[in-house]
Image: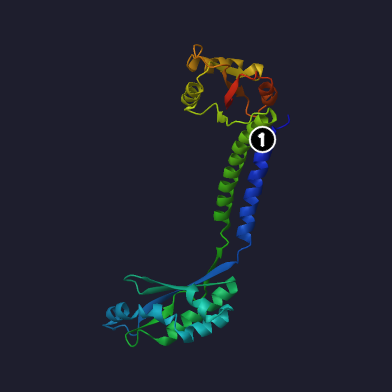
Amino acid sequence: MKAPRAVVEGVLAAVLAGVLVLLAVASRDAVSEGRLALLATPSTPDSARFGEVTSLAAPAVVQLVRSPSVLEVAAEQAGTSPQRLAKAISVELVPASGVARISVRADSAEHAAKAVSAVAKAVIDADLLAPAARFRLVDPRPETAVVSPDWRLATGLALVVAVIAGVATGVLRRGTTARSALAKAGVGHPVVVTRDDDPALTERLTALCVAAARPVRVLAVSPELADRAEELARALPDKASEPGDGTAVVAVADRRGRDLAPALAVLPASSVLVAVVLA
């Protein structure tokens, strides 16, 4: 069975929107992150001031990793400039544990691993906790991970955008179809185009009919919509006693707008189309 054109257009719009999102994500520069953890340990088993020294000196790691000498060495390993690397380094101090986690982001896992190793070595060599303690690596091998592009997030975002694009295309196309039919029928004045599932449909049509001050005629443009047209006619106010010439017409058409233009084209000149309901 042939799919309706509106469905095909909606699917194509959804696919195109999703692909564009994925292409936009793929065009971004790749970013990898290297991570190492440093643990403060006592220099001697009887280091009485270990805890005090660690709590006071450990925060200096945050400043040390961004010092010019450390950045210059690490930037060479990361294949970037010291200025850019300064923004790519982060340090997390785990409270009451003596652990400092150092992270460095670079354009590849290899560069990130080399850079974070260089930064960690500089921290260890600085011996900030001497003489009571010193930092050592928890694991000498850096942990690396791809930070960007995040394909899970990108896929989820692409799906959301695709759904929105598909639905929006369907809604806009229905409105465009009805407007095109109005133009073909030579209707030049503003006409309300609304959907049959609008919760305020009856109230909106009633207000239009009252404003028109003419007898109301609900026109089904195809036989299968006759029952719905009669139902709407019963719900609208009876304006048969209005003195105005002609009738105020509410046309009921399917959502594809089939037969709408021919039906409107043969309306009497005294009739005024006030609304089109897409059922």
Q: Residue at x 59, y 74 (%)?
A: 110
Query: Which one is in front, 95 or 162?
Result: 162
The answer to which quarter of the image holds residue 127 is bottom left
Tell me if residue 87 comes above or below residue 172 in the rendering: below
Drawn side of residue 172 relative to residue 234, left or right: right
The answer to which quarter of the image holds residue 31 is bottom right
Three-letter amino acid code at the position of disc 1 = Ala
Q: How many marks?
A: 1
* Residue 69 spot, x, y in % from top left: 48, 87
For the view shown, which residue lies furthest in the top direction? 241
The answer to which quarter of the image holds residue 255 is top right
Res 278 visible:
no
Res 156 visible:
yes
* Residue 134 spot, x, y in % from top left: 38, 83
Drawn side of residue 11 relative to residue 237, left or right: right
* Residue 241 spot, x, y in % from top left: 49, 11
Query: Which one is in front, 193 or 121?
Result: 193
Tell me if residue 98 comes above or below residue 235 in the rendering: below
Q: Quadrant of the N terminus?
A: top right
* Residue 137 spot, x, y in % from top left: 45, 77
Tell me if residue 196 comes above or below residue 239 in the rendering: below
Q: Quadrant of the C terminus?
A: top right
Drawn side of residue 104 relative to residue 53, left or right: right
Q: Residue at x 40, y 80 (%)?
A: 63
Give the residue at mark 1: 6
Residue at disc 1, secondary structure: helix
Query: Which one is in front, 83 or 6?
Result: 6
